[in-house]
Amino acid sequence: MDIVLVKDAISELSEMIKKINIVNSIAENLGCVDGTIIGTGRSDYTQGSTMYNLSIGNKGFALIDIPGIEGDESAFEDIIKQSLEHAHVIFYVNGSGKKIEQESLQKIKKYMHDGTSVWAIFNTHCKAKKERIPGIDKDYSEELKEAYSNQESIVRQTEEELVSFLGSNYKGSISLNGLLGFCSLAFDDKNNTSIRIENDKNLRRDQEKYLKEYLGNRNQMLEDSHISLLTRIIENKIDSYESDIIDENLKKLKNRMNEMLAQVTILKNREVRKIDGFINIYNEFESNCCNAKEDFIRTMRHVAYNAAMDSFYDLMNELFDRIERDGGKSKDIQSIVSSRKDDIVAGIEKSINEKIERAQETFKEAIEDAKERLIKDFDREQVQFEISLSSDSVALDNAFTDALNYNLKDFRKHAFTVGSLALSGVGVGSFICPGLGTAIGAGIGAVLGILSSIWNYFASEKKRINNAKLKIQQAIDEQIDEISEQINEKLRSLSYEDRINEVYESLCESIELQKKNLMEIRRMICNVENEMSVVYKNIA
């Protein structure tokens, strides 16, 4: 039992000693740089987002170290985007020793699009030497000045590229030697290095070389490193800290709104072109339907005359033949007409029925053809739209596009339903008139009286023949006109024009509904752009 207690006491003492060591380590390194942000020189050294909470002038702020964009940052893309969204000042570090490449510039355009203030830091490499040969080697400070000077053309070229894209959001550049600056600062309050040799031998070795180059003068190391230029940027923001954050947030918001507004404008123009194309297709369809209606009415207005002409044509030729044979003195004309009366009546009835049926079928075919053209035109317009869509690069925020697409789909559900036009089976009913035979028969009887008075026995044979033909032609024409009017009266009683107009107006109502829905989509998209423009203008 006693042994167990001793073991427990030793375990508790061991844990307490560990905690004391941790506290002492924190106390010793309070206010010192920790060295974890210093890279090893390996490409893509920073593998994540690390936040350093700092304080200057009793103002707390965070320094976020994120992966670079010169290498393959695809695995860290989300980290980079999320970190930059929180940034109020961005420090773009160029440690390559060469001007910015086009690929890197494209990545800057991709990531730094919110209008946040950007400073460029050019990390100038100038390593310390373990030993310097007098009379041959220059002082380290001279080599560093030359390194800064040699980098000026790279700085200038890079700044030109950054200004061309960032404009007034680009604030300037700083050339510094980060490793020299870090080594000058990595000391605790007791003037002991805060770089743990067990953690990073190479970094400790570099610090020793720099100290030897400067004969231990850490202040000169700090000054030559130009780190103070960087800290001054942050220190200068202390007094206007809160207002600067507000200004930066407004700038980011306005820039984001401007980008979104530009994208919405592209979307609006694209959709409006598509909607206008669809409305033109509907207008053409409506015009085709109107032409089909007018053709039907025109046919119906002439159907009686054409039917009568067809049926009397054979009779007239037969009478002309008889007159020619009899030298213009035929007495059998009346009997011929009487014997043909039933055939004429049946012929007219049959001809009218065929012509009306053909007119109805033609109307249906014209409407169906218009519908097929409508669908083909829609398909063609849609394909053209999708081709133009594939060449656009509109990438709105997901929340915005989801909401907009929901509304567009809701409208399109009704706007683009061609089947809702109820085009199949278009008909106007039967226009076959009952009792036509009685009306036609009564009219034909009048020809007989006319024919008995056409002969002139004292004229020459040729003259008698011509006069007889002329009289018969006139009589038949009058008969056709009279019968046509009687038939038309019967047809008008069926109100076929009203019925065909009802079919057309029904189609037009459906078309107007489609166009109205399309215009509603058009209005909605234009309103989105207008409302966003108002919001954008009202941002301070």
Image (cartoon, rainbow, N blue to C red):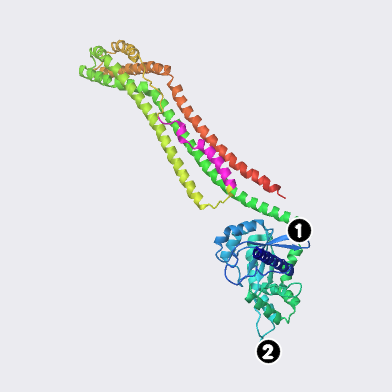
Viewer-side residue, 90 vs 510: 90
Residue that carries the numbered disc 1 in the rendered image: 241
Mark positioned earlier in the residue sequence (2 or 1): 2
Describe the element under mark 1 as helix, strand or loop: helix
Return the x and y of residue 1 as percentages of the image width and height: 65, 62
Circle on res. 135: 2
Return the x and y of residue 269 as percentages of the image width and height: 56, 46
Describe the element under mark 2 as helix, strand or loop: loop
Return the x and y of residue 292 as percentages of the image width and height: 42, 30
Whether residue 78 is situated above or below residue 152 in the rendered picture = above
Work out how far the residue at label 2 is from the one at label 1, CA to CA, in angstroms: 50 Å
Return the x and y of residue 512 as percentages of the image width and height: 52, 32
Tell me if residue 336 can be seen: yes
Viewer-side residue, 368 vs 124: 124
Tell me if residue 467 can be seen: no
| Range drawn in magenta | 399-424
Q: Is residue 417 magenta?
A: yes
Whether residue 374 is situated above or below residue 12 in the rendered picture = above
